[in-house]
Image (cartoon, helix red, strand yellow):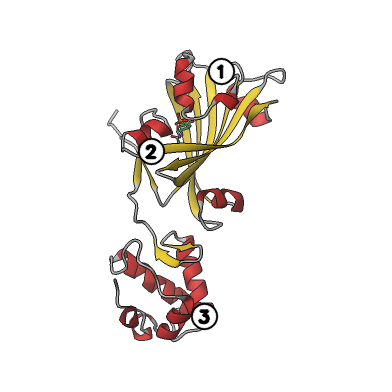
């Protein structure tokens, strides 16, 4: 554990004319994490203690900590204080093979669970109708799920499928792709779009992140071998856990 009296002493991090104090304190603590001087799961002193050691106001400390939380370097645990984040491994997911969330975690010996937040059959929204090739007399099955790995929230996925592909979305308890496989309707190809976004409050809450934290939004459209689109999933993945990796080959 770092000697906070030394590493947070103002002489270690503050230089006149190099920007606001909270920013310099934030940069200094980020550097301590990057250098491993502060290790995953290390607890930071209380806001009051940091203010005293670093000889700054509590407002300055609060602002620096808020930035560290936003950057995903520090997490605030209810009633316990602030801790260095990243004790868990980063999670690599291939962008070039079509695997399900469950399979991906299983391959790493991680237990996956799904919390269904919404499921039902609806009239398609315009974007669902376009992507899935549905007309207004068709219905769409929707499932919103919070996906956890070993109990840690990792992704929030909103999936839409034509009703004939998933007539009973309420029956989906574990793996969507396993269920589709048993019906002979599993996708064989998919196209994904990856975008970096700042998590809006409701998504951040589910993923246990600060509002505005960086997350990856991935939209997947998956197809049957016949070329029919049968899944449109928009998912938010924690960027502090996930690395999406693609293999590139010379044509
Ligand atoms: C992955 C897919 C998602 C699919 C889900 C099925 C990405 C970015 N997304 O999370 O589109 O619906 O797997 O997983 O990889 P399941 O079979 O475990 O429900």
| Residue for badge 3 | 58
Residue 93 in view (yes/no): yes
Residue 41's place in the image compared with 101, above or below, is below
Q: Position of residue 38 (x, y in %)?
A: 32, 68
| Residue for badge 2 | 111
- Residue 12, numbered circle: none
Label 2, ligand 1: CB separation under 8 Å: no
Q: Residue at x 33, y 66 (%)?
A: 33
Q: Residue at x 39, y 44 (%)?
A: 150
SS for callout 1: loop
Task: Name the residue nearer the viewer: 165 or 96.
Answer: 165
Q: Position of residue 248 (x, y in %)?
A: 31, 34
Question: 10 Å neighbourhood of mark 3: few (<14), some, or many (≥20)?
Answer: some
Spot the residue most to the front.
Answer: 79
SS for callout 3: helix
| Residue for badge 1 | 165
Quarter occupied by the C terminus: top left
Residue 16 in view (yes/no): no
Q: Position of residue 50 (x, y in %)?
A: 43, 79
Quarter occupied by the N terminus: bottom left
Q: Are marks 1 and 2 in contact (CB under 8 Å)?
A: no
Q: Are marks 2 and 3 in contact (CB under 8 Å)?
A: no
Question: 10 Å neighbourhood of mark 1: few (<14), some, or many (≥20)?
Answer: some
* Residue 122 horizontal side relative to residue 164, left or right: right
Task: Name the residue nearer the viewer: 246 or 213.
Answer: 213
Cα separation between marks 1 and 3? 56 Å
Q: Are marks 1 and 3 in contact (CB under 8 Å)?
A: no
Q: Position of residue 130 (x, y in %)?
A: 62, 25
> Closer to the N terminus: mark 1 or mark 3?
3
Q: Residue at x 56, y 24 (%)?
A: 171
> Closer to the N terminus: mark 1 or mark 2?
2
> Closer to the N terminus: mark 2 or mark 3?
3
């Amino acid at each position: 554990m770092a000697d906070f009296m030394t590493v947070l002493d103002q002489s270690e991090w503050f230089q006149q004319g190099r920007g606001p104090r909270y920013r310099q304190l934030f940069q200094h603590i980020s550097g301590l994490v990057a250098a491993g001087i502060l290790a995953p799961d290390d607890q930071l002193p209380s806001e009051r203690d940091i203010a005293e050691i670093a000889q700054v106001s509590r407002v300055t400390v609060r602002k620096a900590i808020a930035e560290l939380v936003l950057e995903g370097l520090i997490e605030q645990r209810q009633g316990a204080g602030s801790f260095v984040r990243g004790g868990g491994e980063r999670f690599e997911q291939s962008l070039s093979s079509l695997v399900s969330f469950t399979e991906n975690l299983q391959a790493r010996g991680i237990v996956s669970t799904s919390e269904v937040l919404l499921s039902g059959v609806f009239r398609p929204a315009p974007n669902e109708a376009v992507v899935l090739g549905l007309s207004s007399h068709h219905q769409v099955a929707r499932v919103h799920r919070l996906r956890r790995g070993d109990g840690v929230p990792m992704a929030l996925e909103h999936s839409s499928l034509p009703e004939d592909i998933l007539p009973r979305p309420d029956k989906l308890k574990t793996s969507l792709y396993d269920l589709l496989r048993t019906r002979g309707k599993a996708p064989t190809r998919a196209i994904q779009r990856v975008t970096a976004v700042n998590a809006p409050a409701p998504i951040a809450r589910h993923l246990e992140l600060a509002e505005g934290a960086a997350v990856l939004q991935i939209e997947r459209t998956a197809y049957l071998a016949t070329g029919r689109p049968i899944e449109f999933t928009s998912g938010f993945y924690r960027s502090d856990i996930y690395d999406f990796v693609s293999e590139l080959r010379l044509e």
